[in-house]
Image (cartoon, helix red, strand yellow):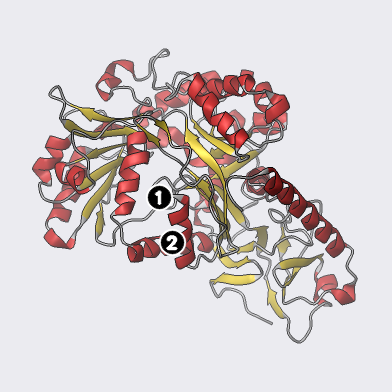
Amino acid sequence: MALKLSNKHFRNFIFTGLMTMAFIAICNNAKADEITPDIILFNGKIFTGDEVKNATAIAISGNIISAVGLDNDIKKFASSNTKSYDLKGHLVIPGINDAHVHLSVWPKSTYFLETPTFDPSWEEVAKEINKATALKDKVSFIFGTMGPKIFYDTNINRQSLDKIAPNHPLIILMFDGHSAILNSAALAKLGFDEKTPDPIGGKFERDANGKLNGILREYAVTSELNTHFAAVTSEDDSVRALKIQLNQAISFGITTIQDMPSDMSVTRSIELLEKSQTPIRVRVTRMNHTTKDGFDLNTDQVTPSSKNPLIRTNGTKWIIDGVVFEGSLTPREDAKTLFGKDDGPYTVTNLPILFNSKQIEKLLQDSLENNYQIQFHIFGRPGAIAVLDAMDKTGGPKIWAGRRVRFEHGDGITPDLLDRIKANGIIVSQQATHLDISEVSAEKGAIIAKNIQDSKAQPLKSLIDKGIPVVLGSDGPLNPYIGILLASVHPDNPEEAISREQALLAYTKQSAFAEYQEAVKGTLSVGKLADLAVLSDDILTIAPPELPKVSSVLTIIDGKIVYDAKKLSEN
């Protein structure tokens, strides 16, 4: 469907949902002799995500779930053409719907630096850079990640990178993707120079003489660096990169990805996904950019539907603030004096925002005028308050309650904001990897974690208890079982931990709701799409340390087996 919904399109959207629900009702009332399964899975543990409990078998007809129940009740539907699989006690879940992903592309000849932690020392990174430069013309780009140790060291800049890599374009990106350091070769390769303007909400840092020092912040990364890097990546390399990520996803039992491509337009993203013949459903959300003059509200405002029924386009995401480690656009030379102070910018309760109230109101108004779901990257409390205030000024709950506005992350949500969030019908899309900040940086992570605990931020349990929809996504490594682990123990704020079943629902049923697809997927219910995964272990009962090791042994999307680890035999 188009991103821009006219009243006619909006009516058609609602009508389609009603017709889908009617179809589900028909399937629920279908007679036994009318069910002709193509696939039957039996002798398992079926987590339906709905009111059906203790099911052990499931039948699939075409691309639809046609029956769920006990083995004997389901197996009797089998015909000579039915493929039947003995699950041998394995757990079956609705396909994981990763609600927050940034699929990316890169040239095949890119050298990725390997470092032992999220927060490597400069010595560790320099050692890897030397390995890359030794390969000479075999490498087109050198790409690495950094943490606070390097980011806060103001001696590391364009000039220091030039000394160690004078000829190779070198990009060192903060692990959270909100800042970067580039050498001269990378700046030139990507077309950045002293005439390059700062986009609003972003910055190309300069030295005292006005020369670029190689440091890029916020929208200078998402609007400029990411798009220029993708632009120099060939179509073949882009398709190859997407296939790597999509194939990894199905091996985890992920059947839907909600992608927010910050490095390319929705149109190009759709073209590449079509060429990659994506095996999974991808919902592409517009992540438009800013310029020196303001917001880009026009690019991909109207996007044609994809030829591939697995690809949908919907919504727009904007970044309202940064991430605590960088303090949004706070100068990094201030880090030593400001980090960890109660009134400093390096806490979820005081993280500066990138836009003023009028600008945020403009974004909200555009979503109303063009009928699309709007999503906001909000890490800190000030960002949450700014958007809630702007929602009040643009109509309040009367206008917004049914529009499913999404807060992506919401780490800075505190108890006093819950009633306002619920009243406005906001969905909180949290990324569980954020819930273990102290793991990223022992010293500074501990300071941030204490701020989270003291302010009772990073809510999960409180949101669910309040009736606020919570969804989970990765925003990094695709492994959803790391996410379920962290959500169920919540290292930063254990009082806000949720059960594994609640975490699984946040990754399935609630994620479907967050993209207006709850009528067709998200639970293993009769009449819904046959998107499911058979897991290697029971994620609801195994010991916590075992969760990250879980994978799919059989992934089915749209009624088709797209991943088979050959652990189950066909009977």
Residue 160, horizontal then vertical, whole percent? 13, 37
Q: Is residue 157 left or right of residue 475?
A: left
Q: Residue at x 32, y 41 (%)?
A: 224
Q: Identify the mark at residue 42; answer none if there is no mark.
A: none
Q: Position of residue 121 (x, y in %)?
A: 23, 38
Under circle 1, the secondary element is: loop
Tag 1–tag 2 contact (CB < 8 Å): yes
Q: Nearer the viewer, residue 388 or 302?
A: 302
Residue 395 lies, with reference to residue 128, above or below; the image says above
User: Does residue 356 appear in this view?
Assistant: yes
Residue 123 quadrant? top left
Residue in the picture at 15% in, 42% down: 184
**Dot 1: within a 10 Å radius of its alpha carbon, few (fewer than 14), some, or many (20 or more) residues?**
many
Corner quadrant of residue 339: top left
| Residue 345 as seen in the image, left or right of residue 197 | right
Give the labeled residue for mark 1: 264
Name the kind of residue labelled 1 in the image.
Met
> Callout 2: few (<14), some (14-19), or many (20+) C-alpha neighbours within 10 Å?
many
Is residue 410 in view from this perspective?
Answer: no
> Which corner quadrant holds the C terminus?
bottom right
Residue situated in front as seen by the camera: 12 or 496: 12
Q: How many marks?
A: 2
Tag 2: amino acid: Leu
Q: Earlier in the sequence, mark 1 or mark 2?
A: 1
Q: Which sits in the foreground, 276 or 70?
A: 276
Q: Position of residue 112 (x, y in %)?
A: 27, 53
> What residue does disc 2 label?
272
Whole-number angstrom distance, CA of label 1 to CA of label 2 = 10 Å
Q: Secondary structure at mark 2?
A: helix
Residue 227 at x, y percent in the picture = 34, 47
Q: Please, which residue is most extreme toward the bottom here?
A: 80
